[in-house]
Structures are given as C-alpha cells and as structure tokens.
Amino acid sequence: MESLNGFIVFVQVAETRSFVEAGRLLGVSASAVGKRVARLEQRLGVRLFHRSTRSVTLTSEGALLLERSRRILGEIEAAELELSQRAEAPRGRLRVSLPLVSSLVLPVLADFMREYPDVQLDLNFTDRMVDVVDEGFDAVVRTGPLSDSRLSARCLGTFRLLLVASPAYLAQHGTPTVPAELLNHVCLHYRFPNTGKLEAWPLRRADGDPEIPLPISMVCDNIETRLCFALRGLGIACLPAFSVTQALADGSLCAILDNHVERVIALNVIWPSGGNLPPKLRVFIDFLHEHLHM
C-alpha cells in the first residue's frame, strides 16, 4: 500500500505541477509530498521531476511512469466501482424489447420478477428490429448476428428451424419427401417487419441448384399466427423448434423433411456498450442465460 500511495502522490504532483497544490488536494503537507516522491525516485533509481524554485516538470522517465500509473490507477478505480455495484441490490426500471415468442420467455420473465421484486420490468414485445440505443432500451433479445459497434451481446442459446404440418393436413395433401414436392403444398410464410422480405426456408441445396420458388399461400410477421394455422391443418410452416416442442410431443404437429433442413440460429441478449453494467441489467442478463432453455 505504501508503494501504491507513492504512485498516487506522484500522479497528483505530475498533474498539478506543484508539490504544494498536490499536498493540498491530498490533505498532507508539501514536505510530506516531497518525501514520498523522493522515496519513489530512490526505489526506482530514476529522477522523475526537474525541480526549480519556479516550476516542477516531468523528466522523460517521469512522463513514461505517468502514462503507466494513470492506466493502473484507472483499472483499480474501475475494479472498485464494479465491486461496489455488485454489492448493491438490483433495483429500478428495466426496459427490455423481446421477440413475439411468449411461450419461450414469459415463464423466465415471471421467475425473474419473483426473484428480483425491486426491478420494474418494462417489456416491449415486437419482431421489429428496434434501435437499442436511440430508442432507450436497457436490453434487447433478438436472433441473428450483432451488427452495431455500439452494442455488446451474450448468446443465450441456439435453436433449429423445423418444417411442420398437422397430421390432418398431411393425410389430405400427402407428406413431401424431397423439397421440390413443396411446390404442390400450402406454405405459410414469415415476413421480416423491417425489410418486408420473406424469410427463406433453410432447405439444403447442392451447389448451383436454384432456390425453390415456394408457393406463398399466407404471409404474416409473427410466430403465433403460423403456428395456429399449422395446428388447424391449413398448411406447412417453418418455425423455431422451441415454439413447437409441445405440439410435436403430443402429436398435433409433425416435422417433415428433417434431412433437408440445415439452419441453426443463435438467440442473443444485446445491450449498449460502455461502462460497467448496472446491477439490474447484470442480474437480468445472467438470469436469462441460466434459465432460458431452448
């Protein structure tokens, strides 16, 4: 600690260019400041300041030490701040944007609210790609790669896309065995809200093979509609595996063309970069990572 105090005194003198002013800011005498600096110079074996009756200036060795000392003291300060924040109880309003997949996230959010009652959740459900920084969100849960350098992300897990249909639909229209047979089926599509483009079904193709022009029988911008229509026997839908787990288990939906579907998607929690995470956001990210099972 004596060594650390010596560096603190040195930085204060270097920044004020005055033993008297450094002492005033540190609450000690100018003489005590001079002794601390002298001991530091003796231990390092170099002269850190050029001293005169009118000025105090850094030597080249002093300039090098100042750069390193600022970095080290800054890291110590950041560590102290982070540890003090960890000791604080998470509290306050937490504004989060999530995709329209209530079956996946609602139970986890309810458990989080029970465990952290002092955090007030402000939840926005949309499949639109929101601007995390400009729209003032603390965190956003989304699929796909991170493309904004202002953001940080943590992967919550991955999921497959599946082609599914009801047994009644397959009994009436037949079960496709190769992707080309989808041309004769009712296909339920997803449109990206931000771009207006249809989501391409992740059908495996040989190099050079053209994309199959799937029939567009219905288009929507959420999971629930396609799931509902598929359950009612109205067509084939491409849906995330986590949204059809129960339906596949109880037989109300069947997966088709499994050997021809190859896409795996990452689900991330995203937040603005910079500084230390507030306790409410830190525990929210950790809780999602620990409890969200896909």
Image (spheres, rainbow, N blue to C red):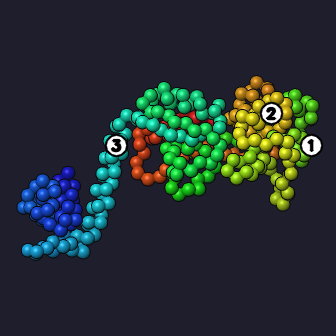
Q: Earlier in the sequence, mark 1 or mark 3?
A: 3
The answer to whether marks 2 and 3 mark residues whose Cβ atoms lie closer than 8 Å is no
Residue 228 versus residue 84: which sits nearer the camera? 228
Q: Position of residue 171 (x, y in %)?
A: 91, 30
Q: Earlier in the sequence, mark 2 or mark 3?
A: 3
Residue 266 visible in this rendered orientation of the protein: no
In the image, taking residue 94 as reference, residue 5 lies left or right, namely: left
Could you give the CA–CA distance between mark 2 and mark 3, rounded to whole angstroms? 51 Å
In whole angstroms, how far apart are the C-alphas of marks 1 and 3? 61 Å
Amino acid at the residue labelled 2: Ala
Identify the amino acid type marked 1: Asn
Q: Amino acid at mark 3?
A: Leu
Residue depicted at x 21% and y 74%: 59
Of tags 2 and 3, the one toward the viewer is: 2
Q: Which residue is mark 1?
A: 184
Q: Is residue 244 left or right of residue 149?
A: right
In the rendered structure, find residue 83 and report the number of the disc placed on it. 3
The span from disc 2 to disc 1 (Cα, nearest Å) is 16 Å
| Residue situated furthest top in the rendering | 250
The kind of secondary structure element at disc 2 is: helix
Please indicate whether residue 262 sits to the left or right of residue 273 in the image: right
* Secondary structure of the residue carrying numbered label 3: helix
Quick one: SS at disc 1? helix
User: Residue at the spot x=15%, y=61% of the render?
Assistant: 22
Q: Are marks 2 and 1 in contact (CB under 8 Å)?
A: no
Residue 105 coordinates in the image, percent (x, y): 60, 33
Q: Name the image quarter holding the C terminus.
A: top right
The disc at residue 230 is: 2
Q: Which mark is residue 57?
A: none
Q: Residues within 10 Å of mark 1 (few under 14, many from 20)?
A: few
Q: Is residue 120 left or right of residue 51?
A: right
